[in-house]
Amino acid sequence: MQDNILSIRNLKKIYHDINGETLAIDNLNLDIKDKEIVAIVGPSGCGKSTLLGILANLEEKSDGLVLLNGRKKLGYMLQTDSLMPWRTILDNALIGLEINNQKTKENIELVNNLLDKYGLHDFKDKYPDNLSGGMRQRVL
């Protein structure tokens, strides 16, 4: 396990609702080494997004062990963007700063620089419907 950047042991995720329980992941074991490319494939509803949500700390696991060796955070690109259609591209990009009360002049400048870097400068005052799917993904 020490050579791995990610080790998962006996991972389990159960969703609970008023109708009962749904087992989404059961006894998943996985090791990923540095520079290894891994694809997670399977039919709809088999737990792929649930696994990624657990790894990114967006969801709690029900049981098991997840070890990220030398890394404190893991992120991933969602299947669909979460842009708010009534907000401009710049306003969508600033929402995290607003929520965390960190919308300062310096941080707004940083976000503008990132929009420039990702080829979105000319679209920062437009709305999500004016962007292609790839451009929408780059906003967040």
Image (cartoon, helix red, strand yellow):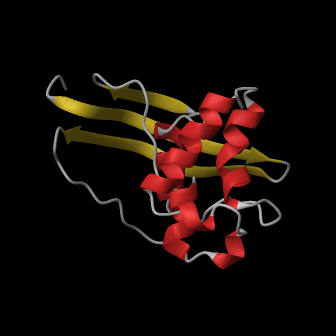
Q: Nearer the viewer, residue 27 or 45?
A: 45
- Residue that appears at 23% across and 41% down: 32
Residue 71: image location, x then y, percent: 34, 26
| 8 sits left or right of 123 in the view | left
Query: Residue at image x 46%, y 49%?
Result: 76
Instruction: Work out whether 100 lies above or below 58.
Output: above
The quarter of the picture where residue 89 lies is: bottom right
Res 107 visible: yes
Percent across and percent down for residue 61 are: 55, 34
Can you say whether 125 is above or below 19 in the image? below
Give x and y (percent) for residue 43.
Answer: 46, 72
Q: Residue at x 74, y 44 (%)?
A: 16
Q: In the drawing, does residue 41 fall left or right of residue 34?
A: right
Measured from the top left, where is residue 111 in percent x and y?
57, 43
Compare residues 119 and 56 and report the one nearer the observer. Answer: 119
Q: Is residue 41 left or right of residue 79?
A: left
How many numbered callouts? 0
Q: Nearer the viewer, residue 98 or 120?
A: 120
The quadrant the N terminus occupies is top left
- Seen at 40% across and 24% down, the residue is 72
Nearer the observer, 53 or 86? 86
Tell whether 22 sits left or right of 49.
Answer: right
Res. 38 image quadrant: bottom left
Residue 25 at least partly seen: no
